[in-house]
Amino acid sequence: MAAASDLFAEHGYERTSIDQIADRAGVSKGALYHHYRDKIEVLAAVYTDLCHEVSGRLLGVAVPGADPVEVLKAGCRLYLEVCTERTYRQIALIDAPAALGWARWRDIDAEDGGFGLLRRGLAAAASAGALPSAAIEERAHLLIAALTEAALLIARSPAPDETRATTTALIERQLEDSRTPRLRAETA
Amino acid sequence: MAAASDLFAEHGYERTSIDQIADRAGVSKGALYHHYRDKIEVLAAVYTDLCHEVSGRLLGVAVPGADPVEVLKAGCRLYLEVCTERTYRQIALIDAPAALGWARWRDIDAEDGGFGLLRRGLAAAASAGALPSAAIEERAHLLIAALTEAALLIARSPAPDETRATTTALIERQLEDSRTPRLRAETA
DNA sequence: GAACTTACATACCGACGGTCGGTTTGTATA
DNA sequence: TATACAAACCGACCGTCGGTATGTAAGTTC
């Protein structure tokens, strides 16, 4: 797994051969195929692992009691930072969707990764009355897609810091705009 | 090109072999490689063509003199319909980004496809004062990413019409929210 | 200790992308 | 019509790579 992760991150999934992974791991091809049905399952395992790791890091920003929309914003900021790390970008943003297919990619992310947290975050904000409770699933999809796009845009930008600031502001603005309007009495 | 387009649309890029394309086109492999440097260039050509075609269709919604934001909304609605067509979905949304890479995918779309129109539409809306003129490039990216995600979500949805309505509403709402606030005197 | 499972290793297969030497067809010139 | 050259085209061949078949040594169970 570590060997595969390294090679995928460095050369991409397609350009990494099963033999290379086996060699790096110090085992034979047969051993590898004993543990994984095929190459794609290796990627699925590596990606799932990565999702777990990122989930752990993202959970750090969830301060209980805080404004749920602010928590979401903080999560988005941190996620964008994670997205710029080479390993996550290559494996989770580029290879996984291409090789696993969009559906499975999102499913794994929803189960074990940041997408799942995002959905729960939106649901929490909705049940706290801060966001509309309608179309949470769809909102989550549009948001994660925007974050992913922003990450790739930042990665290619000649001025990454600036691009990050701009896109972050746009996304946070979107979150702010979608707040449920408060009654005047509630507005402190 | 037509042969390749059909096969890609039906079986996907990876699962289509050069020999199949050549056979279907009634030429030899050598002839094919005489016209295209490698397999990826065949996809690039097919995708570029597809972008042109879609651009033409999208241009139909641009009514001169209309509210630029409304034009954008209409364009988004039409684009979402295009996205649900099998050929466009498979080639432009699934295979092209995976095989060409995100950067080249967006570049072609920006040059010849809907993404270019979107950018110009946002720019037009900005210069008409309807949208902020800042961060147009980034806005365009976030919007096209949302549209793409919505398209794939719709394609997988058990209730596609409903999902399309929901996502369309969310995206139009976003556009509406990002209007530059008008002075009170201007608001008819 | 026989039957069986697990965990590997090695040799091998078929498909596929891409190359290359060579042939045919088209075209400009004399 | 003959010559020269280029563009279009053919199909056999090669290397790589994902995946499989076969073999084997070390437990585990009864």
Image: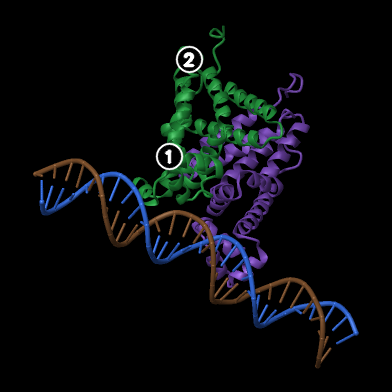
Chain colours: A green, B purple, C blue, D brown
Q: Quadrant of the N terminus of chain B?
A: bottom right
The chain to which mark 2 is attached is A
In the rendered image, residue B9, in percent from the top left (x then y), is placed at 53, 57
Residue receiving disc 1: A1
Q: In this rendering, does residue A75 appear at all?
A: yes
Q: Which amino acid is tagged 1?
A: Met
Looking at the image, residue B40 lies above or below residue A74: below
The chain to which mark 1 is attached is A
In the rendered image, residue B3, in percent from the top left (x then y), is placed at 57, 65
Residue receiving disc 2: A63
Q: Which amino acid is tagged 2?
A: Val
The residue positioned 61% from the left and 70% from the top of the image is: B30
Q: Nearer the viewer, residue A171 or A180?
A: A171
The residue positioned 55% from the left and 64% from the top of the image is: B18
Looking at the image, residue A117 lies above or below residue A70: below
In the rendered image, residue B49, in percent from the top left (x then y), is placed at 66, 56
- Determine whether, in the image, residue B182 is placed left or right of residue A134: right
Q: Nearer the viewer, residue B122 or A73?
A: A73
Mark 2 is surrounded, within 10 Å at the Cα level, by few (under 14), some (14 to 19) or many (20 or more) other residues, namely: few
Looking at the image, residue A124 lies above or below residue B9: above
Q: Quadrant of the C terminus of chain B?
A: top right
The quadrant where residue A156 appears: top right
- Secondary-structure class at tag 2: loop
